[in-house]
Image (cartoon, rainbow, N blue to C red):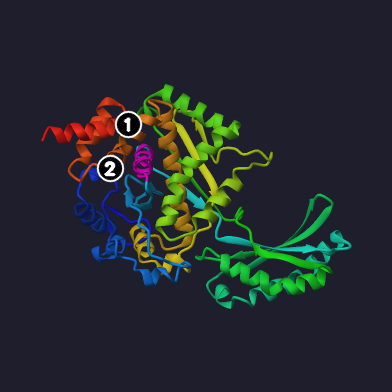
């Protein structure tokens, strides 16, 4: 038994051999015991756990709800402690890969994480300026006044240790225009922060225009949350991965992603497979996180590149690292109002937005580790299609008792075509 990383309750180790082969009820029993929560909380994951009336308050023109599978990634050790990770995804290989990547990391202590804090920014765009460079300085001279005006919009944020931290003013040139853009820099604490910084930007816009001598067009947050970074790293035992040749080829695979935007797009998509699944499970904004991540992947040279790095250490082991913006929260939005999101957060045991951001980043790195290891060894299709075989069997018309034998035949023949699934189903039925 080890302590849960974010709560005082005890937690069984997240290494659970054979977990995938258990029934749903058996998995639930293990998970609630591990996380120290009541099994009733997992009822939020049932089909009727989120009713249409509740859904109508979260979206527009609601007709109903749309269910996706909620799974648990196992094997995760984060900062020396074990944790189970809820993930919402329609693709079986995502959770399997995250669990496998965590297993490789686990051999030498798992993941170490850190973060910068919960800083978000809002932009106020000024146009029709006669003297944009002087206007920038006038705004900086009024920095204290503007920060106080913004802070007055959310006094409760200051009460919990957050609030406005700075006013940064930039000039942006495009075509024949020179725009002045003021950035409100705000510590939003455990919120994602979009509503807070947008409200502040709206409130100060008129005064900003007056001081600068221009006209405001945009006043909205930026999803390039480069002051809200989360980081994860892991040392991977070379022999556990498959030996020095696998380490060498994983580094080669990373280097192609670092140097080639065509490969980087798929490499980073693999990272986001894991990240988006946890962001969605916890009721956070997948689009904001994805936009920030891909923006961050454009490096200082202005070229899209790998979000992660892989390098060999002095002992011949593989060192994997990941750093990216992670604007997620625990208060406000669906995180508090969606019962499934509340259950997912309870399952992780996190108590702050920073802890959640770091955990999500570790999942993204685990996903990346598993993907590169497969690509550097047997190739992606073998494992991916084996997990996908059940979906193909269902698409061919297999019933509940027919899915497993049809999928097994597809895997045995290494042929995952729809016609092959139909033939396997017909053969199974004719033999009855």
To which residue does mark 1 refer? 416
Tell me what residue is drawn at x 47 percent, y 52 percent. 358
* Magenta-colored span: 91-105
Q: Position of residue 406 (x, y in %)?
A: 23, 35
Label 1 sits on a secondary structure element that is loop
Disc 1 or 2, which lies upstream in sequence? 2
Q: Is residue 120 above or below residue 363?
A: below
Q: In this image, 203 relative to 341: left or right?
A: right
Residue 112 in sight from this viewpoint: no
Q: Is residue 241 above or below residue 98?
A: above
Q: In this image, 359 relative to 207: left or right?
A: left
Category of crowding for the residue at label 1, using alpha-carbon neighbours closer than 10 angstroms: few (below 14), some (14–19), many (at least 20): some
Label 2 sits on a secondary structure element that is helix
Q: In this image, 362 relative to 148: left or right?
A: left
Q: In this image, 23 relative to 214: left or right?
A: left
Judged from this view, the residue extending furthest toward the left is 432
Quadrant of residue 307 within the rendered picture: top right
Judged from this view, the residue extending furthest toward the top is 245
Pointers 1 and 2 in contact (C-beta within 8 Å): no
CA separation, marks 1 and 2? 12 Å
Q: Position of residue 125 (x, y in %)?
A: 74, 62
Q: Which numbered marker is on residue 394?
A: 2
Judged from this view, the residue extending furthest toward the right is 130
* Magenta: main secondary structure: helix
Q: Position of residue 92 (x, y in %)?
A: 34, 43
Tell me what residue is drawn at x 68 percent, y 42 percent. 300
Magenta stretch encompasses residue 370: no
Observer-nearest of 53 and 375: 53
Tell me what residue is drawn at x 32 percent, y 34 percent. 418
Observer-nearest of 84 and 1: 84
Q: Is residue 168 above or below residue 235?
A: below
For the C terminus, the quadrant is top left
């Amino acid at each position: 038994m080890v302590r849960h990383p974010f709560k005082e309750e005890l937690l069984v180790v997240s290494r659970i051999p054979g977990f995938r082969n258990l029934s749903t009820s058996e998995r639930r029993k293990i998970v609630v015991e591990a996380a120290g929560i009541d099994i009733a909380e997992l009822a939020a994951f049932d089909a009727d756990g989120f009713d249409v009336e509740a859904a109508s308050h979260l979206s527009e023109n609601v007709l109903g709800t749309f269910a996706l599978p909620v799974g648990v990634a196992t094997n995760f050790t984060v900062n020396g402690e074990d944790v189970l990770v809820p993930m919402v995804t329609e693709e079986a290989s995502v959770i399997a890969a995250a669990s496998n990547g965590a297993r490789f990391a686990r051999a030498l202590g798992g993941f170490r994480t850190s973060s910068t804090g919960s800083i978000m920014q809002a932009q106020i765009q000024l146009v029709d300026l006669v003297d944009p460079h002087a206007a920038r300085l006038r705004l900086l001279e009024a920095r204290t006044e503007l920060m106080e005006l913004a802070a007055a919009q959310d006094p409760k944020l200051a009460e919990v240790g957050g609030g406005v931290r700075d006013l940064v003013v930039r000039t942006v040139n495009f075509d024949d225009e020179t725009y002045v853009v003021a950035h409100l820099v705000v510590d939003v604490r455990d919120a994602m922060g979009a509503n807070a910084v947008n409200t502040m930007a709206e409130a100060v816009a008129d005064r900003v225009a007056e001081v600068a001598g221009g006209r405001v067009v945009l006043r909205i947050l930026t999803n390039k949350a480069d002051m809200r970074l989360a980081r994860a790293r892991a040392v991977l035992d070379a022999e556990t991965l498959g030996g020095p040749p696998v380490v060498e080829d994983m580094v080669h695979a990373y280097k192609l992603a670092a140097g080639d935007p065509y490969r980087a797009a798929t490499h980073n998509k693999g990272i986001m497979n894991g990240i988006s699944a946890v962001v969605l499970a916890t009721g956070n904004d997948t689009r904001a996180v994805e936009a920030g991540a891909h923006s961050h992947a454009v490096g200082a040279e202005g070229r899209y590149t790998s979000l992660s790095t892989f390098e060999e250490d002095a002992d011949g082991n593989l060192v994997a690292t990941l750093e990216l913006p992670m604007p997620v929260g625990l208060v406000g939005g669906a995180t508090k109002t969606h019962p499934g999101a509340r259950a997912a957060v309870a399952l992780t045991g996190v108590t702050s937005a920073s802890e959640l951001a770091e955990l999500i980043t570790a999942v993204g790195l685990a996903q990346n580790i598993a993907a590169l290891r497969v690509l550097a060894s047997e190739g992606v299709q073998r494992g991916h299609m084996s997990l996908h075989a059940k979906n193909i069997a269902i698409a061919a018309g297999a019933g509940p008792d027919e899915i497993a034998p049809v999928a097994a035949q597809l895997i045995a023949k290494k042929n995952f075509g729809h016609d092959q699934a139909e033939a396997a189903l017909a053969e199974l039925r004719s033999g009855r």
